[in-house]
Image (cartoon, helix red, strand yellow):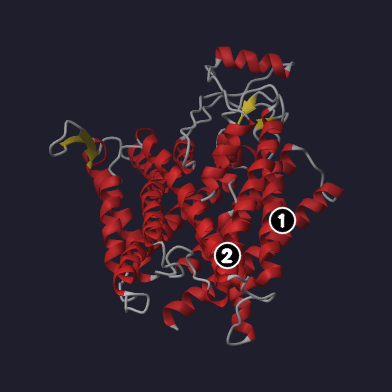
Amino acid sequence: MGKISSAAVEEEEEEESPLVTNDDEHHQAIISTASLSAAVSSSSEEEDPISQQKQLQQQQGDLVHRTGTRWTAVAHIITAVIGAGVLSLAWAVAQLGWIAGPLSMMAFAGITYVSATILCDCYRYPDPEVGPRRFRSFLDAVHHYLGERSHKAGGVLVQANLFGTAIAYTITSATSIRAIRESNCYHKEGHQAPCNSYGDGYNMLAFGVVQVVMSQIPDFHNMEWLSILAAIMSFAYAVIGFGLGFAKVIENGEIKGSMTGVPAANTADKIWLAFQAIGDIAFAYPYSLILLEIQDTLKSPPAENKTMKKASVTAIFITTFFYLACGCFGYAAFGVATPGNLLSGFGFYEPYWLIDFANACVLLHLVGAYQMYAQPVFAYAEAWFTTNFPDSKLVNKHYNLSLPSSKHVITVTALRLCFRTAYVAVSTAIAMSFPYFNQILGVLGGLNFWPLSIYFPVEMYLVQRRIGAWTKEWVLLRAFSLGCLIVSILALMGSIQGLFSAKFG
């Protein structure tokens, strides 16, 4: 870990270059509830940091009027973090039991707060409060503090995370479509009717067809309405899941479950399931990829890092309360029968219309959220092709397509049509091959939690604060990073084992 950190030399003199790159463009799309505008700025040398900042704003064109507050940041964080991952938390608590389950969620809340706190201080350079240089995206900061190699490695991990999330959302959408069909079947035919024979393959294909069409939206700036809709839907189904779990506990008149969780066939299986549950929790919490973009919307004074730290405390507290409520009430309602997906498992039968509405909210959220995660990949790939093949008609020739019975015209290129269609087709094919909701979420959580949420923030903070090797703070941060690495490896191993076990028995 020390090599990457040491490779980042404090760059007191830097060549003037735009901070908003293709990487910026494709990372703005991760925030599902806001269109976070950013302007270009570059660094120069001045004696007074505050005067330098004002001069840069005037001379370099950094005229963005930032109006964000602690509460707007809280709203952005909550709506971006609370999503499909909340549906798996009841199952995760069921695997870990009444002691380890809630404690694990609170532990991840604490880890997320530490990660967010140190990353907040990396927004400005060289001083975390008045430094003239801003980093408006996660990868911009990685590039500056840790160098080109780390920037490329981070880019690969981010792209893998975006693609993996597209696969997870395809799986989740199919289970929600099936849940709606099963809910109506059980309502009409009775709870003992054979309504669980619906497959997910055609549902995934249908979702894929919708995404092929949606993917022709030119870019993220043309789909602000979609991100707002997705945010509303995610909050709606999460609230419904919590309410249904609470109502089920009242109906049962008892709290189900045990201290050690759902029993397994043997000790090894129990351990693997516990590791997988940790991966599911890891998937639900972090927001490091969007933190700097949210911070870039905040007004100052007070300093952005101070406001962002307060916002992180509030948002993590609210999110943790919500996660504990959904996870614990879901486990208390169903005990050993807790479903992998709280809304489509199939744990709830009535009121069937509310189950249908909740799953419709999930489906609408995922239609938009899929694009939130796919558009950055599209932007990055198309920018690369445009740069490397500037004279290619396949890349740069535009065609206007008129929609039937509409005045709207969609502008496409052959590259956009082919690449985006292929992207959706591949993600759909993988989802159909591995249609396992909890296992896929666990793999994504285990794979991305440590490098993106712990390692890079810690290494950047060490460079930003100029913390020397083997000092007390250096040792504590490295121990923190190492501990999280071990947890991530265990979660990834358990989730991969669960994935292959589900696929091959």
Q: Secondary structure at mark 1?
A: helix
**Residue 14 horizontal side relative to residue 83, left or right:** right
Q: Secondary structure at mark 2?
A: helix
The residue shown at (63%, 46%) is 318
**Which residue type carries mark 2?**
Ile
For mark 2, what is the residue? 250
Q: Kindly tell me whether residue 11 is visible in this rendering.
A: no
The residue shown at (31%, 37%) is 218
Q: Disc 1 to disc 2, how far (Cα)? A: 42 Å
Pinpoint residue 501: horizontal percent, then vertical percent.
48, 79
**Which residue type carries mark 1?**
Ser
Pinpoint residue 306: horizontal percent, then vertical percent.
71, 32
- For this rendering, which residue is in front, 480 or 408? 408
Q: Nearer the viewer, mark 1 or mark 2?
A: 2
For mark 1, what is the residue? 481
- Image quadrant where one finds the N terminus: bottom right
Compared to residue 313, the image places residue 52 above or below, namely above
Residue that extends furthest to the left in the rendered view of this protein: 405
The residue shown at (46%, 42%) is 32
Q: How many marks?
A: 2
Pinpoint residue 391: horizontal percent, then vertical percent.
26, 35
Residue that extends furthest to the bottom in the rendered view of this protein: 266
Few, some or many C-alpha atoms within 10 Å of disc 2 (few <14, some 14-19, many ≥20)? few
Pinpoint residue 113: horizontal percent, then vertical percent.
69, 47
